[in-house]
Amino acid sequence: MSEAQRYLDDMVARRGYVLDYHKVMAANDLPVLKAADDLVGAAYLEQRTLGRDVKELLFILSLTVLRADKAHIKSHIRVALDIGVSPKEILEAIEIALPEAGVVAFQHGFDAWREVVGAPRLEPSVTA
């Protein structure tokens, strides 16, 4: 097994996910991937004052506000669910985007949340 493959597998174990760009960087520029991963480790993965659940909610909110790729938002929603964050808590974090980033940003994160959690829906009982 190559060093790049071992590193990528280790990333999955530490993070609970990897993104497509991680896979491509592992194959094409492992030193830069390691440098970027070290920063993420220091700010996000290593235990400091904030718990992993809070960090995931902050990540989901910030990715929503930035209108990040939906797959990226979904990966953090799945991690949050896996570590015990409730779907309602995740939705409340995404809703914080409304006053500052607006409806469009909120809807972007909301759609990712809805798809991951399989949120129930109501249909109107009357026609317009």
Image (cartoon, rainbow, N blue to C red):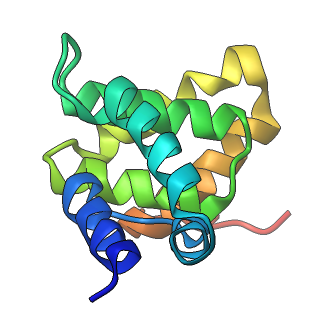
Q: Residue at image x 37%, y 63%?
A: 117
Q: Residue furthest right?
A: 128
Q: Is residue 81 left or right of residue 118?
A: left
Quadrant that contains the N terminus: bottom left
In the rendered image, is residue 27 in sight?
yes
Q: Residue at image x 58%, y 30%?
A: 62
The quadrant where residue 63 appears: top right
Q: Is residue 22 left or right of residue 58?
A: right
Viewer-side residue, 114 vs 53: 53
Q: Give percent across and percent down for residue 49.
A: 19, 10
Quadrant that contains the C terminus: bottom right
In the rendered image, is residue 73 in sight?
no
Q: Give percent across and percent down for residue 33.
A: 52, 54
Q: Give percent across and percent down for residue 8.
A: 36, 70
Q: Give percent across and percent down for residue 58.
A: 44, 27
Viewer-side residue, 8 vs 95: 8
Q: Is residue 30 left or right of residue 102?
A: left
